[in-house]
Image: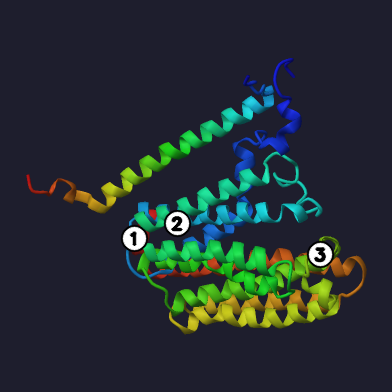
Amino acid sequence: MVTMMQLTEEQLRSRRSRSKAIAWTLIALVALFFVVTIVKMGGNIVNRPL
Amino acid sequence: MADVGIDFSQETDAVGGGLGNAHDFFELMKPRVMSLVIFTAFVGLMLAPGPLHPVLVATALLAIAVGAGAAGALNMWYDADIDFRMRRTARRPIPTGRITPGEALSFGTVLAVGSVIVLGLLVNWFAGALLAFTICFYLFVYTMWLKRRTPQNIVIGGAAGAFPPMIGWAAVTGSVSIESAVLFLIIFLWTPPHFWALSLYRMNEYKDVGVPMLPVVAGVDATRRQILLYSFVYVAATLAPSFIGLAGEGYLLFAAISGGIFILFAIETFRRRDGKRADKSAKNLFAFSILHLFLIFSVLLIEKKLEFGSGWTFLW
């Protein structure tokens, strides 16, 4: 039988804090790649054969 | 603690962490060291010839800062055993049990790989490769190989801290040059007098954990002599930018005067050999060395701004 680990309040708070930091980092990375793509391609982003 | 299940709070260190919050992980990145890395890399980015979009400047700085933080985290992972026993480092996240060594290793590795990929993909791969080399040099050459084996640890290992302006320069130009090598040389030669001044008044801590810093191995007098010698060479190197076209006469004047003050601090450290005044002079040199490096790079930047102000108005 599997026994679930019981986390203390402090551990739960720490885990939430870590999860939020990871989420924000991923969002920031997506935004960064998006912005840099626009910066590098500039107006050329619409200049492609149809 | 609940009635059912494992008492995780008591097993944290052994089982695999869980106590560290985001701030603890940030602390693992040595934010104070990171701030100097960001600043010197920024100067490298600004002094380099050629345009770079401000978004790419910010991206390069972010990647270099995260790479430096990753190196710091990996250093804390490897050095956890001695950090635990030194007063200066005993409150770090691993010795206090907030983060396990395994977590620090994973965190540092992910950030190291991530920062190199971001710099390589978004800026250029030469800068990315230089960042990867710097992280590897700091971890494998300095932390693992030299630090506990030779009193020359911080002389050779200091190269890791000297690379950031060169990486910044490479982010703009895609190459290294004599100018970026001079920026490297300034920090490289600054490192020994800076850290040996610290080790003079922290000698016993290094001795207790078996790190062969120069005062522990060669004695305090030899260390003071080396500090003085390196100070002369360092100050000479700070004058070099004016002779290779990287800076002008205003910078040269500032570097000469502030360098003279640096040498006065080094002479004071060399002369004061006993008691609290000896410690105080070493502490003064340590503090002034940080200020001096900051000012030297600031004046390089300001002079460049005055000369080529219109070139990077987006920042001012």
Above or below, comparing residue A3 to residue B243 in the picture: above
**Under tag 2, what secondary structure?**
helix
Q: Residues within 10 Å of mark 2 (few under 14, many from 20)?
A: many
Query: Disc 3 designates what residue?
Result: B210
Query: Disc 2 designates what residue?
Result: B116
Q: Amino acid at mark 1?
A: Leu
- Residue shown at 67%/41% (left/top)? B99
**Under tag 3, what secondary structure?**
loop
Nearer-N-terminus badge (2/1): 1
Residue farthest toward the right in the current orientation of the protein: B275
Report the Cα–Cα distance between label 2 and label 1.
19 Å
Q: Chain of mark 3?
A: B
Q: Nearer the viewer, residue B238 or B258?
A: B238
Residue B205 visible (yes or no)? yes
Q: Amino acid at mark 2?
A: Val
Q: How many marks?
A: 3
Q: Comparing marks 3 and 1, which lies closer to the viewer?
A: 3
Residue B233, quarter of picture: bottom right
Label ID, residue B52: 1
Tell me: A41 left or right of B301: left
Above or below, comparing residue A27 to residue A16 in the picture: below
- Residue shown at 71%/28% (left/top)? B8
Q: Chain of mark 1?
A: B
Nearer-N-terminus badge (2/3): 2
Q: Comparing marks 2 and 1, which lies closer to the viewer?
A: 2
Tell me: B160 left or right of B199: left
Q: Chain of mark 2?
A: B
Q: Classify the position of the C terminus of chain B by image quarter.
A: bottom left
